[in-house]
Image (spheres, helix red, strand yellow):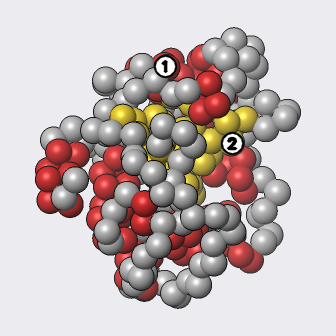
Amino acid sequence: MRAAALGLMLLSCAGPLAAQAYQCRVPATAPLQEIRPDGPIRTAPVTGYVMALSWSPEFCKPRLEQRSHARQCSRRAGRFGFVLHGLWPQSARGWPQWCPTSARPTGAQLAGQLCRSPSARLVARQWAKHGACMARTPRTYFRVSNILFDSLRWPDLDRLSRKEALTAGDLREVFVAANRGWRKEAVGIVSNERGWLEEVRLCYDRRFRPTACDAQRFGPSDDAALNIWRGL
């Protein structure tokens, strides 16, 4: 799909921006990153997509003093809720990755993502591992990712976290209530072994419309207990 047509299609279904990076400011540039593949090249026809949204308070809980995560976790660059981990193309069997490309993000392109994905290394890695398998240039990959991310409305997880006997189904319900056109089957959840929320993974079909996640991406069942760290 050509970039222009893809952008127009996505803009038609975008909703209002709901900022997750409170008080975040985009720098003019960011250091270029050298990313080396840590797995095999896999090319395959793209049949859908998964957008991974990390819950920053949980990610930062053990990393508050780590310099490598200072932008996301120190709060000096703003307070983050959900952050864009990445947009991942899927195939009928597994997922394509590390597709060969000579294209590299510029410092300005990396910086432009830092209020959605607060790590230049993370941004560069997502392009190299996933984006190159679905777009010709970093600019197109970031543009598609941003349109999808900015179209979402964010439920109040601070309030939800205080609910007694909270379940994964409760989180799916409030997300679906906030986002027209979504249904619970398309909202995957990742929690750790203690039941704390780590990520939400949204499943899309080839046209970037919500579609049911498979069992692996759906994660815990609706009745599974869930905890949400508020970052106190």
Residue at image point 78% right, 72% down = 66
Q: Please, is residue 17 above or below residue 158 in the view?
A: below
Q: Amino acid at mark 2?
A: Glu
Across and down, in percent, residue 38 comes to: 69, 69
Q: Please, is residue 2 above or below residue 227 in the view?
A: below
Q: Residue furthest right?
A: 194
Across and down, in percent, residue 196 comes to: 76, 35
User: Label 2: few (<14), some or many (≥20) within 10 Å?
Assistant: many
Q: Is residue 193 left or right of residue 136?
A: right
Residue 71 found in image quarter: bottom right
Residue situated in front as seen by the camera: 219 or 195: 219
Element under label 2? strand
Residue situated in front as seen by the camera: 101 or 73: 101
Q: Amino acid at mark 1?
A: Lys
Residue at image point 40% right, 48% down = 45
Residue 184: which numbered mark, if any? 1
Q: Is residue 137 left or right of residue 221?
A: left
- Marked residue nearer the N-terminal end (1 or 2): 1
Cα gap from disc 1 to disc 2, whole angstroms:
18 Å
Element under label 1? helix
Residue identified by numbered label 2 = 198
Across and down, in percent, residue 115 comes to: 46, 64
Residue at image point 73% right, 17% down = 224
Q: Please, is residue 67 above or below residue 133 in the view?
A: below
Do the residues bearing badges 1 and 2 touch, measured as CB atoms within 8 Å? Answer: no
